[in-house]
Image: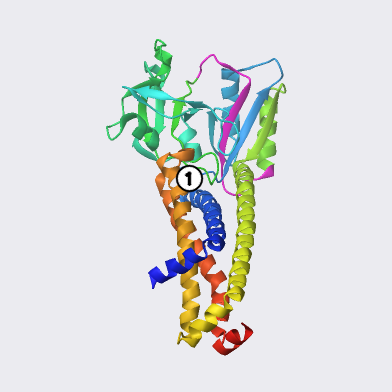
Amino acid sequence: MLRHLFTLIWNRKRANLLLISEVFFSFVVLFGVGAVLITVGKNYLAPQGFESTQVWRLLVRAQQGQKMPRAELDDVLRQVKALPGVQTVALTSGNLPFTFNTNNSDFTYKGRTTPFANTYDADDHYAEALRLHLREGRWFRPADDGTHHRPVVISEDMRQYLFGDEPALGKIFTYNIPGKVTKPEDEFQVVGVVDNVRMESDFSAAIPSVWKRLIPYDTTHWETAAVLVRVAPGQGGVLQEKIARTVAGVTRQWSTEVRVMEDDRQHRRLFTLVPVVGLCLMGLFLIINVALGLFGVLWYNISQRRAEIGLRRAMGATGAGIGWQFLGEMMVVTTFGVVLGGLLAAQFPLLHAFDLPVQPYLLAIAAAAGAVYLITALCAWQPSRLAAAIQPAVALREE
């Protein structure tokens, strides 16, 4: 039977070449959309690695051309923390979660080099503010003031890149700067390891991360200070106003901005979803057009092959057999298109395109193949029924 179907397809190779091309492009479109949706969905279901609810971000800025002494800034933060409803205040760098501000570096340890990792400055209260989960070791503490190397906490994926399955605590790594003599300030000692974090958006993958300890009571002068403020449940605009007044009460030369981190999260979520939804709508439009084209081509083929169908029925073929013949021809043609599309799609995981793991690509290939077969079967079902309903006497009389 299969050999007979191949013979029929070969006899109509010009018409079937168009069908194979349509199936091929349908597969490619579905593969691309599927890879994006699977990657986004997998990232969304992965643990966030921290808790952003009840966290606000406070930005304190000095006037243009001026800077904030660290001692005066610490005094402001102590007064903010003393406000009723404020649970924790943590000083950090400007690359806060769900913002578009990033700070990346790559590091090395005994010949192992990491990809670009997110680096954060963090004080001793940062882990409490975001409720990071420690897997090994500890967070920063006052006893770290006199250490020779700058203490750091790294994420689990960063530990894998640097140390593999070896213990990480106490080890020292450096910036990856070829040809440059390593200075003490470029050496970092691991004191803790936390779960992987996804701070870009709900749909982003975890990125290796390093938190460097902010030394308290240093002489640094800040132009802009980023602060994480964890508040008690139910706090709102009244507390935000109190925080702004507290900062202004210390010095009116500084401006403040208080934003709810969940608002930033929603904004970043929409920013990510808009292009994904647009891609899905474009893919759906193309698939609908391809499906209509397949349906029309099959309908036309049946009208051109009425004499063949009538002759087969006259020789004893059943209506169901005729229907299955047309459906089988379409499935074989679809297989040619799927195989060609699969060969193209297989290049993506082989070349590690877009730095994605292999699994989403394999799932996208399987999903695209299943969807193409389903679409083709649905498009071929009604024309196959029409072919099965043709009576031999009617068909032969028309000829």
Q: Classify residue 135 by image quadrant.
A: top left
Q: Amino acid at mark 1?
A: Gln
Q: Which residue is mark 1?
A: 48
Q: Classify residue 363 by image quadrant.
A: bottom left
198 to 189, vertically: above or below: below
Residue plotted at (48% across, 45% down): 48
90 to 50, vertically: above or below: above
| In the image, farthest residue toward the left | 166
Is residue 13 in view?
yes
| In the image, farthest residue toward the front | 399
Residue plotted at (63% across, 24% down): 224
Quadrant (top left, top right, bottom left, bottom right) of the C terminus: bottom right
Instruction: Bin the neighbour count of mark 1 within 10 Å (Cα to Cα): few under 14, some 14-19, many 20 and up.
Output: many
Where residue 342 sits in the image (x, y, percent)? 45, 52
SS at mark 1 in the image: loop
Decide whether residue 233 is among the magenta residues. yes
Residue plotted at (60% across, 34% down): 100
Quadrant (top left, top right, bottom left, bottom right) of the N terminus: bottom left
What colouring style does the render use?
A: rainbow
The span picked out in magenta is: 217-237
186 to 324, vertically: above or below: above
The answer to whether residue 80 is left or right of residue 367 is: right
Where residue 54 sits in the image (x, y, percent)? 57, 45
